[in-house]
C-alpha cells in the first residue's frame, strides 16, 4: 500500500456505514420502480430530496440486520468459519422470510431460497438459486466488510457464503465479495480516488480462487467444468462493469442518470458499480450522493443503500445529520451494531 492510498481511519466507520445504508434505503424506497421524470415530478429537484416521514426501510436493511445478527451469534461461538456461520445466518434469513414485517417488496430469489432453507435437513447448496445474480446478494453484505478481526480469507469466504445462501450465480458471489472489500477499504481510510484501481486489482488477484471451504460443491450445480471456471465467470463480469465505472468517472456527469453509465442495479455487479458511481461523484457530499442514487431509473433503494454504506464507511457517523439519522427505522439496532464493531475495531 502506498503512503498516499490511505488516509486517517474515519471515526465510527461501522456506525456511519450501517446508518448510511438504511438512510439510502429509506430515501430510495418511494422512488423504486419509477423513472427519473416521474421521480422529479413527485419529489422535486433531486438535489433537495428529503427523507420521507416516516422513514421506512425495505428488505435491503431488514436482511442486512439479519446478516449482522447471524454474524454476531457466529462470532460469539469462536473463530468465524463456514460451519459456525452458516447455521445462525440461515436461521436469521428464515426468520426474516417468516416475519410479518417482510412486506417491503422483497426479491423473488430471496423468497424462493429462504422457503427452501427453512427445511433444516436440506443442504444450503440445494436451496441456493444457482442462476440468480440479483442485487439481493450484495445489498446486505456490508456487515461482512465491517466486522473486525477477520483475515482476508475469512472476509471473502463469509461474503460469498452469505450471498450463496440465496444467490448461487458466480457473479453474485464475486460482487458480494467485492462490495465487502470496498467497504473494508473505505472504513480503513482508503482514498476514494484510488478505490476503483484497488478493486480491479482485487478482481484479478481472485479471478480463479474458489473458496471451497466456504462454498463446498456449490459450483457443481452450474454447467461449468471446474470450480475455477465457475468463479472466473463472476469475476470477469465484475471486471467488465468496473471498466464501465472507470470510463464514467473519466468524464463525470452528475446531472445524468447514473444508471445510463453502469446499469440499473437489479443485478449484483451493476448495483455495486452504480452505487460506487454515485458515491464517487460526491465523495465528500454524502447527502448529495444519496439523493443522486435515489433519483435513478433503476433499483433506487438498493443503489442508495450501497451508496450510503460507502459514504458512511468513508466519512464515519458524522456524515449523517441527526435530523435524518434519528428518524430512520431501526436506528437503534443499527447504531448498536455500529458501536459493537467500532469499539472492537
Image (tube, rainbow, N blue to C red):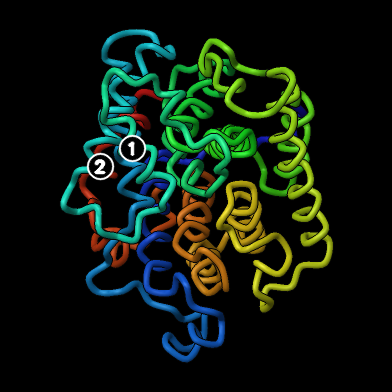
Q: Position of residue 276 (x, y in %)?
A: 62, 53
Q: Is residue 32 left or right of residue 168?
A: left
Q: Which mark is residue 2?
A: none
Residue assigned mark 1: 114
Which label number is shown at residue 96?
2
Badge 2 crowding class, 10 Å Cα cut-off, few under 14, some 14 to 19, many 20 or more, is: some
Nearest the viewer among 316 and 250 is 250
The answer to which quarter of the image holds residue 254 is bottom right
Would you place residue 39 above or below residue 144 in this image? below
Sequence-wise, the earlier of marks 2 and 1 is: 2
Q: Is residue 151 visible?
A: no
Q: Quadrant of residue 23?
A: bottom left
Instruction: Kindly report the distance in space between the C-alpha atoms of the residues bearing marks 2 and 1.
Output: 9 Å
Say if residue 25 shows up in the picture.
yes
Write the residue at 76% across / 67% down: 252
Query: Is label 1 in a helix, a strand or a loop?
Result: helix
**Image quarter (top left, top right, bottom left or bottom right) of the N terminus:** top right
Element assignment for label 2:
helix
Along the line of sight, which residue is nearer the eye, 247 or 321? 247
Look at the picture and state if 256 lies above or below 322: below
Say left or right for 138 vs 241: left
Question: Is label 2 or label 1 in front?
Answer: 1
**Vertical relation: 306 (above or below) 146:** below
Point out the image quarter for the C terminus. Answer: top left
- In the image, residue 210 lies at what x, y percent? 65, 18
Check whether the beta carbons of the residues at disc 2 and disc 1 lie within 8 A of each other.
Answer: yes
Amino acid at each position: 500500500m502506498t503512503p498516499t492510498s490511505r488516509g486517517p481511519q474515519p471515526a465510527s466507520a461501522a456506525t456511519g456505514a450501517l446508518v448510511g445504508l438504511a438512510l439510502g434505503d429509506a430515501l430510495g424506497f418511494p422512488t423504486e420502480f419509477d423513472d427519473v421524470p416521474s421521480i422529479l415530478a413527485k419529489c422535486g429537484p433531486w438535489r433537495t430530496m428529503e427523507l420521507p416521514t416516516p422513514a421506512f426501510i425495505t428488505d435491503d436493511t431488514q436482511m442486512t440486520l439479519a446478516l449482522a445478527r447471524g454474524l454476531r451469534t457466529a462470532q460469539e461461538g469462536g473463530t468465524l468459519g463456514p460451519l459456525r456461520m452458516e447455521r445462525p445466518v440461515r436461521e436469521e434469513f428464515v426468520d426474516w422470510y417468516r416475519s410479518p414485517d417482510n412486506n417491503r417488496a422483497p426479491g423473488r430469489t430471496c423468497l424462493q431460497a429462504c422457503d427452501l432453507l427453512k427445511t433444516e435437513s436440506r443442504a444450503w447448496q440445494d436451496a441456493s438459486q444457482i442462476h440468480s445474480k440479483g442485487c439481493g446478494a450484495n445489498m446486505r453484505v456490508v456487515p461482512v466488510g465491517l466486522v473486525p478481526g477477520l483475515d482476508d480469507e475469512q472476509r471473502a469466504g463469509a461474503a460469498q457464503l452469505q450471498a450463496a445462501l440465496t444467490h448461487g450465480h458466480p457473479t453474485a458471489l464475486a460482487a458480494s465479495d467485492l462490495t465487502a472489500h470496498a467497504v473494508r477499504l473505505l472504513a480503513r481510510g482508503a482514498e476514494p480516488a484510488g478505490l476503483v484501481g484497488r478493486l480491479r486489482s482485487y478482481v484479478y488477484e481472485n479471478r480463479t480462487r474458489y473458496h471451497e471451504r466456504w462454498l463446498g460443491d456449490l459450483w457443481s450445480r452450474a454447467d461449468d467444468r471446474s470450480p475455477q471456471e465457475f468463479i472466473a465467470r463472476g469475476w470477469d463480469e465484475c471486471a467488465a462493469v468496473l471498466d464501465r465505472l472507470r470510463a464514467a468517472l473519466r468524464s463525470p456527469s452528475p446531472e445524468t442518470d447514473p444508471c445510463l453509465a453502469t446499469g440499473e442495479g437489479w443485478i449484483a455487479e451493476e448495483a455495486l458499480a452504480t452505487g460506487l458511481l454515485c458515491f464517487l461523484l460526491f465523495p465528500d457530499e454524502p447527502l448529495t450522493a444519496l439523493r443522486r442514487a435515489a433519483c435513478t431509473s433503476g433499483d433506487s433503494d438498493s443503489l442508495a443503500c450501497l451508496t450510503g454504506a460507502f459514504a458512511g464507511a468513508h466519512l464515519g457517523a458524522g456524515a449523517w445529520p441527526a435530523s435524518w439519522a434519528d428518524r430512520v427505522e431501526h436506528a437503534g439496532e443499527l447504531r448498536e451494531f455500529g458501536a459493537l464493531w467500532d469499539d472492537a475495531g
